[in-house]
Amino acid sequence: MFKHILVAVDGSDTANFALKEAFKLAKECGSELRIAYVVDVYGVHPEVEFISIDEMVCALKKEGKKVLKHATQIAADAGVVSQASFLETSEIAPRIAEALANEADAWPADVIVVGTHGRRGFKHFVLGSVAESIVRVATKPVLLFRPV
């Protein structure tokens, strides 16, 4: 069914839940799994004067690599062969959703797996939703998982 599964992680419990569901799917389908983390370096605004932008970007990248290493270790422990994909936002893909959708097209993934908080109302309005954005921009099917 799905030979290539791209799963997005960010270190959150919701993303980890989706990751574990992607493991199950990969095992059932005999799929290759690519675990992707996107660092939003394009969204960092240099006009903030009291923070070193270089240090902030470095910290974001360090955290992303840590999350990816942990996720690939969990995959290995679960007996799932995976590869890590460390992505950054850019002028071409200025949002996390676009970076993931572009990676799914380039790899090529058959499906994108993402965790969602399932927020509604004001929280959704204020916080937005990367998962919803992926659904809007992706050319590949998107499978959303929400922990219950």
Image: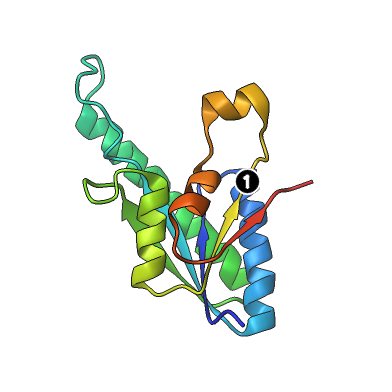
Give residue 118's quadrant in the image: top right
Q: How is the protein colored in the picture?
A: rainbow
- Residue 10 lies, in percent from the top left, at 50, 47
Residue found 54% across the figure and 82% down from its top: 3
x, y percent for residue 53: 22, 29
Answer left or right for 57 relative to 128.
Answer: left
State the residue lying farthest toward the top.
50
Determine the secondary structure under disc 1: loop
The front one of 73 and 146 is 146
The answer to whether residue 143 is seen in the rendering is yes
Q: List x then y, in percent, for residue 94.
A: 29, 44
Q: Does residue 5 appear to the left or right of 147 in the view shown? A: left
> Which residue matches tag 1?
116
Q: Visible in this render: residue 65?
A: no
What residue lies at 64% left-to-right and 69% top-to-bottom?
23
Decide if residue 138 is on the left or right side of residue 78.
Answer: left
Which image quarter holds the N terminus?
bottom right
Quarter occupied by residue 124: top right
Looking at the image, which is closer to me, 148 or 55?
Answer: 148
Q: Amino acid at mark 1?
A: Thr
Q: Can you say whether 30 is above or below 62 in the image?
A: below
- Write the residue at 35% across / 53% down: 99
Say which residue appears at 56% left-offset and 26% top-offset. 125
Q: Nearer the viewer, residue 103 or 133?
A: 133
